[in-house]
Amino acid sequence: MRALLGSAADLVLPRTCGGCCTVGAGLCVRCERLLSGEARPVVPRPVPDGWPPCWAGGSYEGAAAAALRAFKDGDRRDLAPWLARCLAVAVDSALVGEPAAARAATTGRLAVVPVPSARRTTRRRGDRPVVQIAQAALAGLHQNEAPIVEALSLSRGVVDQAGLDAVARRANLAAAMQVHPAGLRRVRGSVCLVVDDVVTSGSTVAEASRALQAAGAAGVVAAAALATPRRSGLVNPLPGGRPSD
């Protein structure tokens, strides 16, 4: 149904760039260049307790931030390939940077775990954007090397993270995730690669890591398509939108 509605809309409204809104392309040449993907380690400030090694494939700023917002909440699922490319760069860097994760991939003990979404958010969007870009990002790997395991769920209600500061984000997600029974066997003893679309305060990834380790994961690493520069302090921040992580 989503695809049919999108096709019908294209007959009436011209497609615009998801990054700068110019008419004529899903992503213009300039914005596509900005989303080319350049992996970097992510260390939020302040560092959340239990923060795992984490890489991001780009900065959540400018055109990249606009494209991610359009993809998640503007029904622009056509932007998935560009965001998946950023996530793929981050995943590759995580596997290279963490030998335990690379070994787990070769022995069938790696589990790629998307961060969970609240049920009301999934109902509103009609799908799970993080899972969609993860599937595209992992397309070049054999399924046995990096299977997607949707093991995490929210054990209680949480509010939208947008607008919350770092302290409030941590409190909002504290002990809010769990590995559901169907995922326990796959998580226990495995190295888990947590994937997300954007890292801001790091509260989501940190809580996912806590829940997975509590369920018996042998280790946790993380990868995100984008990360907010002002949080990591690794690059100079540029104007951009407010993330909703």
Image (tube, helix red, strand yellow):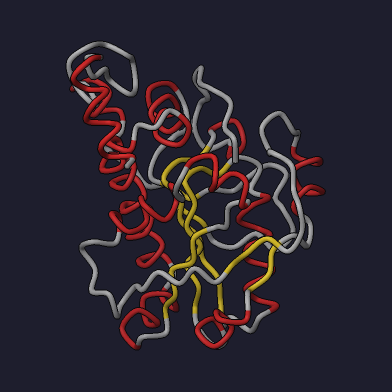
Report the residue at 66% width, 58% height from top.
Answer: 206
Query: In this view, which residue lies farthest toward the top?
Result: 22
The foreground one among 138 and 235 is 138
Q: How many labels does the image show?
A: 0
Of the 4 image quadrants, the one containing the N terminus is top left
| Spot occupied by residue 102 in the image (x, y as percentages of width and height) | 36, 75
The foreground one among 156 and 134 is 156
| Spot occupied by residue 176 in the image (x, y as percentages of width and height) | 74, 60
Report the residue at 57% width, 57% height from top.
Answer: 116
Q: In this view, does 170 lie above or below 175?
A: above
| Spot occupied by residue 37 in the image (x, y as percentages of width and height) | 31, 41
Q: In which quarter of the image is residue 175?
A: bottom right
Report the residue at 49% width, 66% height from top.
Answer: 113
112 horizontally vs 24: left or right: right
156 horizontally vs 22: left or right: right
Q: In this view, does 109 lie above or below 116?
A: below
| Spot occupied by residue 47 in the image (x, y as percentages of width and height) | 70, 50
